[in-house]
Image (spheres, coloured by chain):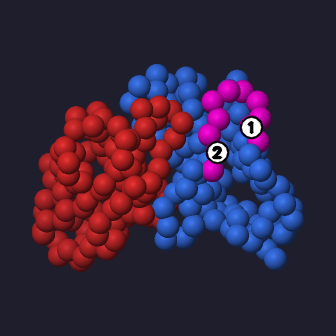
Chain colours: A red, B blue
Amino acid sequence: GEEVAQTPKHLVRGEGQKAKLYCAPIKGHSYVFWYQQVLKNEFKFLISFQNENVFDETGMPKERFSAKCLPNSPCSLEIQATKLEDSAVYFCASSQLQALYGYTFGSGTRLTVV
Amino acid sequence: QKEVEQNSGPLSVPEGAIASLNCTYSDRGSQSFFWYRQYSGKSPELIMFIYSNGDKEDGRFTAQLNKASQYVSLLIRDSQPSDSATYLCAVIDSGGSNYKLTFGKGTLLTVNP
């Protein structure tokens, strides 16, 4: 399809629980990116993939965050032992090979940790 | 630390006026520059990208880039109430090989009918 599909739209977890978010990129797009938006407008880069391979993971808090993009499956972002500070909207985006021309964002998953 | 700076606003303009949104960036080697529009509670939507010095026009939108001054702007002509949103400036930094966007914190634009 022509949209980046993210599920679920909302996710509520108790502190210490696991959260798993999913993203299906636009068909034919080689790159997948995960961003975290906190405090309304502040975007933080987490990780990117080129096909199934991690391309850049410099933004990932490695102790509790992990991500995968496997063939024929949606990409996933998993947070083990969630903390209150993980509450944010998590956006996935995808782009064609020429990512220098910008990428398309999904509608986001709002994670609330209580 | 590579930074992208925007005035947080709010910027308020009357309907029909020109809205001017500004952005500066710290990485002199930055290659590509983007303006995204984000309505409240929604995802960012790409409006314009520019990578050469000068102006780029698309309908009511004009992006302007001045690499010497490390400055990029977005002009919205004939502003409409539906343009009311947060406008995010984003940059792919030097080398561009990781395709990672660095975002500004956004400028809230309100167009008053």
Instruction: Answer whether residue B102 is magenta in the image.
Output: no
Q: Quick one: A101 or A16, which is closer to the camera?
A: A101
Q: Residue at x 70, y 24 (%)?
A: B68
Instruction: Answer whether residue B52 is magenta in the image.
Output: yes
Q: Residue at x 71, y 33 (%)?
A: B65
Q: Secondary structure at mark 2?
A: strand
Please, which chain is the residue tagged with disc 2 on?
B
Distance from label 1 to label 2 (Cα)? Answer: 8 Å
Please, which chain is the residue tagged with disc 1 on?
B
Outermost residue, right side = B16
Q: Are marks 1 and 2 in contact (CB under 8 Å)?
A: yes
Where A18 falls versus A57 (above or below)? Answer: below
Q: Residues within 10 Å of mark 2 (few under 14, many from 20)?
A: many
Residue that badge 2 annotates = B48
Q: Earlier in the sequence, mark 1 or mark 2?
A: 2
Residue A100 is situated, as x and y percent measured from the top left of the image, at: 50, 33
Residue A62 is situated, as x and y percent measured from the top left of the image, at: 18, 45
Quadrant occupied by the N terminus of chain B? top left
Residue that badge 1 annotates = B56
Residue B72 shown left or right of residue B38 in the figure: right
Residue A54 shown left or right of residue B22 in the figure: left
Tell me, yes or no, if residue B9 can be seen here: yes
Q: Write down the quadrant of residue B37 in the picture.
A: bottom right
Q: Secondary structure at mark 1?
A: strand
Residue A98 is situated, as x and y percent measured from the top left of the image, at: 47, 31
